Every structure is written in structure tokens, then in C-alpha cells.
Amino acid sequence: MEKILISSCLLGTPVRYDGTGVQLLHPQIMTWQQQKLIVSFCPEVAGGLPTPRDPAEISNDKVITNIGDDVTAEFKLGARKALQLCQQHNIRFALLKESSPSCGRNTIYDGSHSGTKVKGMGLKLHC
Ligand code: SF4
């Protein structure tokens, strides 16, 4: 059966910038866990960032924290590792945390660190 990549924080792992997780409770996830189909991954941690960490947002193709540090390299490394993992396991499906500058699929924060969301995706490798 096909594996499914899931953002680690959605499984309750405390890897978010503020040291928390956001466990998604759904019977299907429990079924996938029992079937050992889930591949849990956090690109920001894989990219070498600590937990907790300063929140970061995408701005002009860079990823910048709320104190002005450029963490683009770490985000790109995490994205590359996510791609490698998907290729390694032939993963075609993913359940990702919305609005994250790494995992976001439909929305992200606008880069102003003001809590404003816009349409967009987490960091793409061509950025
Ligand atoms: S990078 Fe993805 S998996 Fe990691 S904490 Fe952020 S949303 Fe969750």
C-alpha cells in the first residue's frame, strides 16, 4: 500500500515554532498508523532549526524570522530532504499543516509578521 507523508506536528509531535503540536484526531489516521503507512516529517527540524524557534514567514522569496534572521537556507534544506524522503518511499500523497511557511498548501502568512494570511504555498525549491 502507498505511504502517506504527514506533517509531524499534525501527529501531535511538539515540533512547531512554539514547541507545540496540533494533533489531528481522525479515525483514518489511526488506521493508517496501524497499517504503518504514515511517514512523519517536519522540514523545519530536518533543516536544522531548533524547537522552539522564532516564527518565520516568506517574504520576497526569502524566509525571515520575526527578529529579522534569514533562515532561507534551513528551509530549503528541509524542503530538499522532504523531496528525497518522498522519492525514497514513492510517496504521492501528503497531509500537510496549512499556513506553515514550509508545509502550507493553500495559504501562508504574508511576510509582515502581522498575522495576515494570503494565498500561497510553503517554500518551493526554486525560490
Ligand atoms: S514545518 Fe511543517 S511539520 Fe514542522 S512544525 Fe511546521 S507545519 Fe509542522
Image (tube, rainbow, N blue to C red):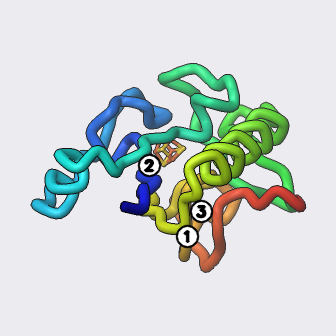
The secondary structure type at the circle numbered 3 is strand
What label does residue 7 carry, if any? 2
Residue that label 3 marks: 109
- Residue 21: horizontal and vertical position, in percent? 32, 38
Pointer 3 residue Cβ closer than 8 Å to ligand 1: no
Q: Mark 1 points at which residue?
A: 105
Mark 3: give few (<14), some (14-19) or many (20+) Cα within 10 Å.
Answer: many
Q: Which is in the foreground here, disc 1 or disc 2?
A: 2
Q: Check the picture and name the quadrant holding the C terminus.
A: bottom right
Residue drawn 17% across the image and 46% down it: 34
Foreground: disc 3 or disc 2: 2
User: Badge 2 local density, few (<14 within 10 Å), some, or many (20+)?
Assistant: many
**Number of dots carrying numbers:** 3
Quarter location, residue 18: top left
| Image position of 93 (left or right of 36) | right
Side of 82 where 123 appears, left or right: right
In this view, the residue in front, 49 or 96, is: 96
Q: Who is closer to the viewer here, 96 or 21? A: 96
The image shows residue 28 at horizontal and vertical percentages of: 17, 63
Identified by mark 3, the residue type is Tyr
